[in-house]
Image (cartoon, rainbow, N blue to C red):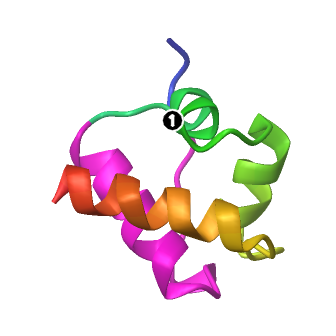
């Protein structure tokens, strides 16, 4: 597993993604694994983490909400 790049939580526009990234760090889930769990590419998840984009699909948002609920 690669080393996690430092993420600036304040750059993340979407509160849902902010929660997801915080939980991923807390549970030592790699960005690659988290992208796989959500069903998106690593590049898309990386753009979410960098605050460059937010989830547009209602299905993606629902999957993320489900993951957040399970990791709490």
**Residue at the image point whose x is 38% and y is 33% from the top:** 29
How far across and how far down the image is residue 25, in percent? 33, 48
Disc 1: CA contacts within 10 A as few (<14), some (14-19) or many (>=20): few
Q: Is residue 65 left or right of residue 62?
A: left
The residue that disc 1 covers is 4
Q: Is residue 36 left or right of residue 65?
A: right
Q: Residue furthest left?
A: 72
Q: Is residue 32 left or right of residue 16?
A: right
Is 56 or 6 nearer to us in this picture? 56
Quarter holding the C terminus?
bottom left
The chief SS type of the magenta part is: helix
Q: Decide: is 62 above or below 36.
A: below
Is 51 within the magenta? no
Quarter location, residue 65: bottom left
Is 22 within the magenta? yes
Query: How many marks can you see?
Result: 1
How far across and how far down the image is residue 71, in percent? 22, 51
How far across and how far down the image is residue 48, in percent? 70, 64
Boundaries of the magenta span: 5-27
**Residue at the image point whose x is 72% and y is 75% from the top:** 51
**SS of the residue under disc 1:** loop
Q: Residue furthest top?
A: 1
**Residue at the image point whose x is 48% and y is 78% from the top:** 16
């Amino acid at each position: 597993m690669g080393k996690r790049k430092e993420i600036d939580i304040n750059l993340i526009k979407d509160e849902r993604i902010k929660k997801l990234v915080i939980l991923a760090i807390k549970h030592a889930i790699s960005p690659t694994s988290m992208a796989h769990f959500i069903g998106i590419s690593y590049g898309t998840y990386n753009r979410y983490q960098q605050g460059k984009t937010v989830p547009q699909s209602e299905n993606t948002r629902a999957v993320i909400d489900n993951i957040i609920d399970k990791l709490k």
